[in-house]
Image (cartoon, rainbow, N blue to C red):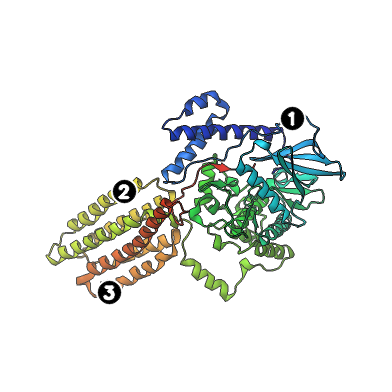
Amino acid sequence: MDMTKGPSQLKKTDSDELLASLLEDLLQQSRKGSNNLEQLCESHPEIAQELRELWAASQFADVFGRAEPLTPQKFLPESPSPATSLPKYFGDFELLEELGRGGMGVVYKAWQKNLGRMVALKMVLRGGQARPEEMARFQAEAKAIALLEHPNIVPVHEAGVYEDQPYFSMRFVEGQTLSTVLAQGPIKPRDAASLIAKITRAVHHAHERGVLHRDLKPSNVIIDRENHPLVTDFGLAKRIDIPGEITLTQPGAILGTPSYMAPEQVSSSRGVVGPASDVYSLGIILYETLTGRPPFRAASPVDTLLLVLEQDPVRPRLLNPKVDPDLEMICLKCLQKQSDLRYSSAQDLAIDLEAWVRGESTSVRSGSLGSFSNFFSRMLRDTHHAIVLENWGLLWMMHSVMIFFQCVATWYMGRIGISSPWWYILLWGGGLALWGAIFWELRKQGGPVLFVERQVGHIWAAAVISTIGVFFTEIFLGMPVLTLSPILAIIAGTVFFTKAGILSGEFYPPAIALYLTTIPMALWPEYCQLIFGLVSALCFFIPGLKYHKLRLRSRLATNRGEAPGGSSQNNLVTTQSAR
């Protein structure tokens, strides 16, 4: 919760509430088979563009086969309203000034009469009219903060209910948010590292007590008069130390602020939200302190979420050459798409930041044997793009059959004495081109094609062109047809090697197998095409079968109402942003 918001930000919050209300109406109408989107846009021209984008976001989720109902987190009418005249008495508190408001709560600067102290008083927007889940989340926030005692976390003084209005009071911090500081531009790298190290220690303290923040961002960090950072707004906090705790989050809902969310917060297929998710958000904040901007920000929330899922951040040193290479490595380690590649805990991140500030070596520059073993183990794991392979499993199995019979046909043509290269060019060039068109059309029927899939498609097209080029090379050099057939294994191996770097390290062994296949192909030319067909088909069929089974499991889990462990990005719906 930003405790220093101005009038323009409050106006923005009002428009957010109206957008959420209109979007929920549209979703309810859509379930009944109709909607009046254009009519609403005409009635509210000032938010028409944003409404269309959010509506498109909810429809985007349907394209990816989301099984859960689309239920947005609505920003409901609040109480007291922004128009409430202040000062005003609220029990033992005199409300002096509104400091800020978010999706569920509002914070006031208040004077506590019986103790004679200034506090920050937070209450539910709708007061006694709040929905049960709003009350539960508000109480969960108060309980979460009550567990924490750290000099860099804003503490709770007390909690209670007055006239059916739940509230809790916190220490009032004189200062400004980190977002206000960063509005002036990046800060010095050493100051940034020292600042984030303190915030990270506070977050680690929360993790030790079983509390995830889940909405770490500059506007939720207050810098006091002594330049000390304090983490605030645990409105989206989650307890991780209570087995079987009832979740307050609807299945498939997206919690957080798009530019500061970890991939697993955007899509359950990217992993489980945990301490590493907060580490990712800390890395985003570090990135912004070093460069003056978050690594992922687009024209709309949906586009931003897609960047979070698919794109790698621009290196901080390209935006700010003053950033030290080691500090850049620390930052980028936090921003790994796969949670197990980030720091294992917020404490480990703090240790590296503090070591860098002191001029000592950090773990990201370790040259130990362990780091080399980690390097090789990481080579064989999936990249964050590997999720798209579930869309290709069945197609690759079909491709393996096609490539095998194509190689058998080539071998048979050679055995019966067909020596004209043009028949082989027709078989491989025309056959692969036709199959490629069918293959791509089948893939498009499975849902929207992502950018990385287009990259893989271009690699495959390059392999087809190279294959045809082998036959033309034989013609230009005056060689008998099929003389250069072992080169096909080199081309195929290179395709798999490239896919290993883009999609998954599991493709390195097939790449090596195909490279080695050139040896028996050269030693036994009479069976050259059969050898290549068998090895190539297995290299496609085995991973195809694996990812097809994963897709079937994902669909089964979705039908059972469970969180899919490996499905496409299927929960880009409505972002609950604690702005």
Q: Looking at the picture, tell me which residue is in the foreground, 121 or 151.
A: 121
Residue 570 in sight from this viewpoint: yes
Residue to which mark 2 is pinned:
442
Q: Is residue 47 above or below residue 500?
A: above
Residue 491 in sight from this viewpoint: no
Hey, what amino acid is under mark 2? Answer: Leu
- Badge 1 or badge 2: first in the primary sequence: 1
Q: Is label 3 in a helix, a strand or a loop?
A: helix
Q: Is label 2 in a helix, a strand or a loop?
A: helix
- 344 relative to 429 in the view: left or right: right
Q: Which mark is residue 97?
A: none
Q: Is label 1 in a helix, a strand or a loop?
A: loop
Q: Is residue 279 above or below residue 181?
A: below
3 vs 1, front mark: 1
Query: CB under 8 Å between callouts 1 and 2?
Result: no
Residue to which mark 1 is pinned:
84
